[in-house]
Image: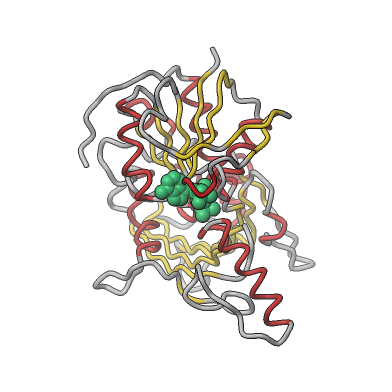
Amino acid sequence: KDYRVAILGATGAVGTELLHLLEYRNFPIAQLKLLASPRSAGKEMTFKGEKFVVEPVKDGAFDNVDLVLASAGGSTSKEWAPKAVEAGATVIDNSSAFRMNEDVPLVVPEVNPQALELHKGIIANPNCTTILMAVAVYPLHKVKPVKRIVVATYQSASGAGARAMEEVKTQSQEILAGKEPVTEIFPYPLAFNLFPHNSPLNNFGYCEEEMKMVNETRKIFDDRALRVNATCIRVPVLRAHSEAINLEFYTPVKPDEAKDILKLAPGIKIVEDWQTNYFPMPIEASGRDEVLIGRIRQDISHQCGLDLWLCGDQIRKGAALNAVQIAELLVEKNLMQPVRAQLTT
Ligand code: A2P
């Protein structure tokens, strides 16, 4: 069977990658619809050599659609995802709008594919830094339970969208030309700079991005006892995120043991050459499916501690690839049927 697919936010950084991956991975498509805001109406995009015209999302846009891949921001998803489900579609949503909703599975296919079986029309794609960390930590957690994760992120511009990536490039040119860099998307210049993630702060001083890593990881691992502490930083890298992760296990885990587990785990490539200080780098993770992991070492401050370093393509495994893998699982498990359940919001 082939499916009638719509991409909501097709013109964005993730939307463009979704289109590319659906073609590259040969997803079974009977009919394709590209939706965005009225700003992009009429724009042409190519899929398998054929031109498709972008349409503005409006009432009726999801009639006769089986699957919606949404990446157009939280408010757009809040408005349109329930309507798409009402019209009979299954929605894989890349925004944070429904992630913590009890009726919505939050899925990383390498970690909790079974969660899909309970979906009621909407499936949430986790936050990008959370996905990358989950792919790396879960295989270890399954064998030797993790008690606490302390993570610092080095997040690329792509997480803030296609226009944010352009802003960093333009700012770099402006600075090199001796001009004042112009900021529109980010609150501060990102070129030749970095700053803590600018999402809203809570009363404890943690930003929303950091709390996503805490709450989403616990939901994906289905482990409410897991402690997570994150510091999220935006860096002037275009499309791959990096993370320095410290793990505290209940019992000691040797670096070689961890490496052996990770070598066999799905979606991971070990990148380590201790002789030349060669470890994962965002430019090498860009455009790749795997999460690159290296610098796996004993925490010298704690006998049950282990450190690792990872880089992963934010647009790919951090967003579009994870969503397409979920879509492939829905096909494989025959779970893409119209479900008209009431979602609690
Ligand atoms: P548009 O290109 O018409 O603005 P990114 O994450 O790269 O910024 O991309 C966001 C995507 O979401 C774009 O495709 C954008 O379309 C789309 N989008 C943003 N706001 C809306 C909206 N209100 N309705 C539909 N699509 C939207």
Q: Please indicate, yes or no, whether residue 136 appears anywhere in the rendered image.
A: no
Q: Residue 288, position in %: x, y?
A: 68, 47
Residue 233, relative to residue 283: is it above or below?
A: below
The quarter holding residue 310 reads bottom right
The quarter holding residue 235 reads bottom right
In the image, 122 versus 168, the foreground residue is 168
Residue 39, relative to residue 3: is it above or below?
A: below
In the image, 240 versus 11, the foreground residue is 11
Q: Please indicate, yes or no, whether residue 29 appears anywhere in the rendered image.
A: yes
Report the residue at 46% width, 60% height from top. Answer: 247
Which residue of the protein is positioned furthest toward the top in this rendering? 1
In the image, 305 versus 195, the foreground residue is 195
Q: Which colour assignment does the render follow?
A: secondary structure
Q: Residue 338, position in %: x, y?
A: 35, 19
Q: Quadrant location of the N terminus?
A: top right
Q: How many marks?
A: 0
Q: Residue 55, position in %: x, y?
A: 51, 36
Report the residue at 42% width, 60% height from top. Answer: 149
Q: Residue 326, position in %: x, y?
A: 49, 32
Residue 338, relative to residue 35: is it above or below?
A: above
Which residue of the protein is positioned furthest toward the right in this rendering? 276
Q: Quadrant location of the C terminus?
A: top left
